[in-house]
Amino acid sequence: MGKRIIQQRRGRGTFTYRNRKKAFKIRITYPQKEGEAEVLKLVNSPAHTAPLAKIKLGREIFFNIASEGLIEGQKIMVGGDKIDKGNIVELGNIPVGTTIFNIETFKGSGGKLVRSSGITAKVAKKAPKGIIVELPSKKEKLFNKNVRATIGIAAGAGRMEKPLIKAGKKWHMMKAKGRLYPRTSAVKMNVIDHPFGSGRGKRIKSKVPKRNAPPGKKVGLLSARRTGRKKK
């Protein structure tokens, strides 16, 4: 009798494999009101790669991704047309060539794109239908001029420069986010642990499981559009 493979074990939803709610308790949003706000505190969140800023606007307190160079006690503007690091401004009021991050997909969504540490997008040009933004992937995307973004570069750019040194540190980082680590290659498993397991037949052919296959069988190319080598 074999044991459950990882897909089956994780899919059961026990506490061993669930996300820690504590890590994801902070929600990044933009306030509905406009005006001058103050940065109360810079916060480290296990669920986010960049540090977060706890900001107070009037009686409302919200969290945003900290921009590079932001400090505690700094005053920022929400709304208006003042272009300064950390300010939250509508795309229609941002000049061409300005670096931005944490962009809304629609007005009021609270920032959904370009949120990882150290990355930035750029306002490429203004079109009659909206604002064209060059994303970190170098692809251009059209946005409504009323959506908001934060001026500057997302903080934490040097996160990947220091090596982790120990596997234990990486394990704790992945554990906080509920990620699978360490990941073992399927062909290195025993035959009872995975359909690709065993020491024989290491030259694996691509496998496309059926759509209604159970978790133990659903491995390989899931819902593949095509298989085989691409011809030039």
Image (tube, grey):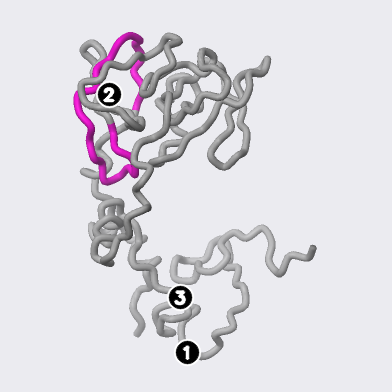
Query: The disc labelled 1 sits on which kind of residue?
Result: Gly
Q: Secondary structure at mark 2?
A: strand
Q: Nearer the viewer, residue 155 or 89?
A: 155
Point out residue 225 in the picture as x, y percentages from the top left corner. Answer: 66, 58
Residue at image location 36% in from the left, 46% down from the top: 158
Q: What is the spatial separation of the Cα atoms under label 1 and label 3, in whole angstroms?
A: 11 Å
Residue wearing tag 2: 62
Q: Which of the marked residues, 3 or 2, is nearer the chain's N terminus?
A: 2
Q: Secondary structure at mark 3?
A: helix
Residue closest to the eye, 113 or 1: 113
Residue 78, percent across and down?
Answer: 36, 14
Q: Amino acid at mark 3?
A: Ala
Location of residue 134 with respect to 193 vertically, above or below? above
Q: Earlier in the sequence, mark 1 or mark 3?
A: 3
Q: Is residue 87 left or right of residue 139?
A: left
Label 3, on which residue?
186
Nearer mark to the viewer, of 1 and 2: 2
Distance, label 3 to label 2, CA atoms, is: 44 Å
Helix, strand or loop at mark 1: loop
Q: Is residue 43 magenta?
A: yes
Q: CA distance from mark 1 to mark 2?
A: 54 Å
Which quadrant of the structure image shows residue 205?
A: bottom right
Residue holding disc 1: 199
